[in-house]
Amino acid sequence: MGVKATTWRQTIQGGKQLFRLYPSRGNQTLTGTVTLPSTLNGPIQVTPFDTLTLNGATVTVENPCRGHILYCKNLIVTGAAAIIHMNGKGCTGIDWENYDLDIPAAIALASLTSNARTLLQRFLRAGWYLGDPQLWKDHAGVVQAVLTAGANKIIDKTLLGAGGYFAALSGWYSGCMGGAAGAAGTGGPGGGGAGSAYCGINYVQWGGIGGKGRPWRGGFGGQGGPSCQSQGLSGDQNRQGSPGGVLVVVVENDVTVGPGLTIAANALPVTGGTNETGGCGGGRAKLLYGGALTGTPTITANGAAGQSGNCSPAAGGAGKADSSTFTAWGL
């Protein structure tokens, strides 16, 4: 007689409870430059603390990845201003299908193998965000996941910044022409700026169109017109520069800004690339807090300038940068 397959099932409570599943680093005071582990081109990374005190610290991740969620029960800045950032840390090595990103209300898991339980524990030990839709797609052969959407979106795939349109020089024209800047992302990262064009009389040249913002990074800038009678590569083809990444700071209780706190997911200027290349788009920066906010943090996801040669290529668009209370977000 055959043995009937047993289906393993588990439903995980979402919201703020989700972050309590990760093994905490405890109470810590950080100073200087602190680089936290992350997987290159890998999943959204969760770094959990209890009370986190920053004294002049600059905190980021080691490798560009799909995003970073820094979670703590209390956040205190003392002594000197602190920075938490994903500047230039947008994931650039791989592109996936666009997705919405939120803090799910629940996650239902099902599998025909007991290996799924082990896989879930591995995710938690590695600090990989269970609300990362791509994480479950990458492991769909082992476990099927159904994510119940949270009340609000961190990233809305329909509201990403568009890339700037190209510049063209044609006919009896000599000089520079810049394309359009990348559009701001009203629900996520911003788009890349268009490249600029420079050529002499009687020639045609086009700057490349900027790339659209993606849920894991700002858009790349379009390449400048490389030579007369030619067109620069689009941002998605060009892939020069360091777009802003995705950063979410989640504080379950109180935030004390003290001498200053910057939460940033800015793009970095293009260096060492093709002249006239447009700037990269900013990423996504978000602060969520459940208790009192004392002081005013600076939250930015700025686009960057392009790499100028003879002309001035367009800048990348800004990504969305804001803060919300747990109550407003239904957490």
Image (cartoon, grey):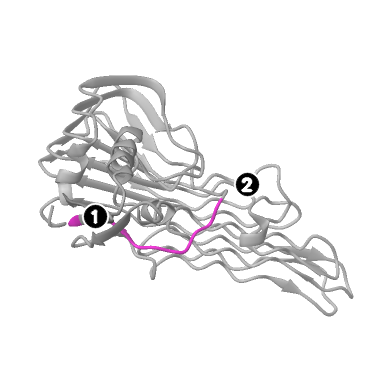
Helix, strand or loop at label 2? It is: loop
Residue 63 located within the stretch drawn in magenta: no
Q: Is residue 141 left or right of residue 151?
A: right
| Image location (x, y in percent) of residue 183 | 48, 66
Q: Position of residue 57 (x, y in %)?
A: 35, 25
Depth check, mark 1 against mark 2: the one in front is 1
Q: Using the rendered view, name the quadrant where residue 177 is placed.
A: bottom right
Q: Earlier in the sequence, mark 1 or mark 2?
A: 1
Amino acid type, residue under disc 2 in the picture: Val
Magenta span: 94-106
Above/below status of 105 relative to 35: below
Q: Nearer the viewer, residue 185 or 120?
A: 120
Quarter of the rendering containing residue 111? bottom left
Q: Is residue 204 visible?
A: yes
Residue placed under numbered mark 2 in the picture: 270
Query: Which one is in front, 239 or 269?
Result: 239
Q: Which residue is mark 1?
A: 7
